[in-house]
Amino acid sequence: MPGTVDYDATKAKQYYKKALSQLGKKNLTVKLLSADDDQTKDVIEFIQSELQQTLPGLKVESNSIPFASMLARASSGNFEVNFTGWSADFADPISFLSQFTSNNPENNGKWNNQKFDQAIKNSNNKDANNPTKRWQDLINAEKILASDQGITPIYQPNGIDLVNPKLKGVVYDRINGHYDYRTAYLTK
């Protein structure tokens, strides 16, 4: 969404300076919780470096722990900033958006916005049988979430697979990247 997660170092510095002033501090330390796998550690190192270079006086402490422990801490709300990812369960924006309603147990940051909640409620109830209105409800919800920064998307992973053209019958799940080979076979 333009204007919500665009890179703008000048604006970031302005907001950071304003936050320091409001807190009555000259510097700030933020603890960043994440899983301890190699890919996540690389991303965290990049984020840590970029933030500390861009925002003078900011120290980002990385707390990389085993995935299950990270999930438990995040679920209990025991974090300042949590870096995590997820994939959709099915091909519909509600699979992501519903996680951020005020009463959803997956909403670990406890972000809430009544207009967001109402848009999700409308998409699931009042407008569920009207695809145009439902889609607009979901767009409105996404705009609210992005504008409020209820979450901050960092990146979307992608992969490229080479597939032998003789391999047939594989079910490719375009939602979460999993493949099902139960019906796979090779042709000549």
Image: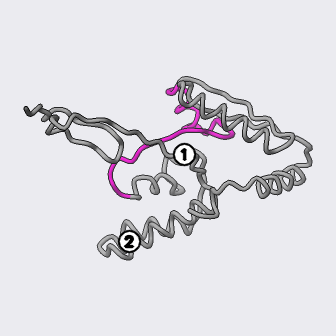
Q: As displayed, is residue 104 above or below residue 126?
A: above
Residue 102 inside the magenta-drawn segment: no
Identity, as a three-letter code, of the amino acid under mark 1:
Tyr
Residue 79 inside the magenta-drawn segment: yes
Q: Residue at x 73, y 35 (%)?
A: 49
Q: Residue at x 87, y 49 (%)?
A: 20
Q: Quadrant of residue 148?
A: bottom right
Q: State the extent of the magenta-drawn residues as a range.
A: 67-92
Q: Quadrant of residue 158?
A: top left
Q: Quadrant of the C terminus?
A: top left
Mark 1 secondary-structure assignment: loop
Mark 2 secondary-structure assignment: helix
Whole-percent x, y for residue 90 in the image: 32, 51
Q: Quadrant of residue 84?
A: top right
Q: As displayed, is residue 151 above or below residue 4?
A: above
Tell me, for residue 134, which label it has, or none.
2
Q: Is residue 149 left or right of residue 175?
A: right
Q: Residues within 10 Å of mark 1 (few under 14, many from 20)?
A: few
Q: Is residue 80 left or right of residue 158?
A: right
Whole-percent x, y for residue 56 in the image: 86, 42
Q: Which residue is at the front of the view, 125 or 184? A: 184
Q: Is residue 150 left or right of residue 48?
A: left
Q: Which residue is at the front of the view, 144 or 10? A: 10
Q: Residue at x 60, y 47 (%)?
A: 109
Q: Which residue in the protein does label 1 denote?
A: 155
Q: Quadrant of the N terminus?
A: bottom right
Whole-percent x, y for residue 87 in the image: 42, 44
